[in-house]
Amino acid sequence: MKTIFDTSRTILGNIPVYETYLTSHPKSSEENVCRHCVLVATGMGPNFWFRHGLRILNHLRPDLLISFGFCGELTASHSDSGLYIPTIFRPPGYHSSSPLPVLSLTLPSSVIKTLAAYGGTVCQAISVPVYVPKKFIATKDTAPSILDMESYFTALVASLFGLPFICLRAKTDGPDDEIPFEVNRLIDSSGFVSIRRVLSYAFGDPGVIVSFFRYFRRSAKAAAVLKEAVLAVLRLPLADLTSIEPPRIMGDSDQLAKD
């Protein structure tokens, strides 16, 4: 497997996260088959897909799409490491009359077991604007739930293209330790944190500088968790990787069973 399109360097750093899987599999009949993996990092939201992603995926038709990035917990912590694996993706406004479907992803037990060794917990991802206070987001306290805007749209693209998909998220905040500033004010049109916007925000409100420092420390810790998780996925045996399926649209009966 080799990565043809990689948007991950802002989080994982300039490291060869995919070279570990370029070695041959002597016992595999597909050892000489070139497999393509696309890594999609945090920040690659709707704007990215509308501008570039659809064209790239239509041209490459990769064998696997890996989405990864940061998230906020909506319920009491279920993961010691802060690593979450969403298998249900709820769109913006899912609690009302959203025209977008709820998506479901069934992952092989071998994949879940591998990620569980890194503290990974299966959860649902709820998409709402980042500035909505978590206390206003309806969710079950007994079920692991995370707040994540990008994963839904990436899962939707994977579903539409019929691409095998896996999503990895690491928490940066929770219901009892929310980030005390508006993260969306720091993000530029590319979907990533802008240093210029950070400085502008800090000059306007010097009191948030300490909060910025804490947030970036959390982000560094979350990035380290993500790096290990992505490497774990890329090192999976070929049989496990090829058994990963595309997300599917949940019907009414599926949603009633899950809710």
Image (cartoon, rainbow, N blue to C red):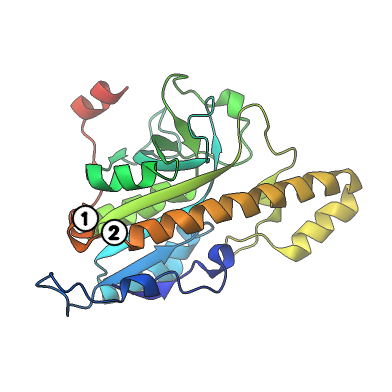
Please, is residue 78 above or below residue 70 in the view? Answer: above
Q: Is residue 178 left or right of residue 11?
A: right
The residue sitting at the left extreme is: 29
Q: Residue at image x 48%, y 29%? A: 78
The residue where tag 2 is placed is 236
Q: Quadrant of residue 124?
A: top left
Q: Residues within 10 Å of mark 1 (few under 14, many from 20)?
A: some
Mark 2 residue element: loop
Q: Position of residue 188 (x, y in %)?
A: 65, 61
Residue nearest the observer in this picture, 14 or 58: 14
Q: Residue at image x 34%, y 63%? A: 234
The residue where tag 1 is placed is 240
C-alpha span from label 2 to label 1 = 6 Å
Quarter of the image for the N terminus: give it: bottom left
Q: Is residue 6 left or right of residue 179?
A: left
Residue type pointed to by label 2: Leu
Residue nearest the observer in this picture, 197 or 146: 146
Q: Is residue 189 left or right of residue 158?
A: right
Q: Residue at image x 20%, y 33%? A: 251
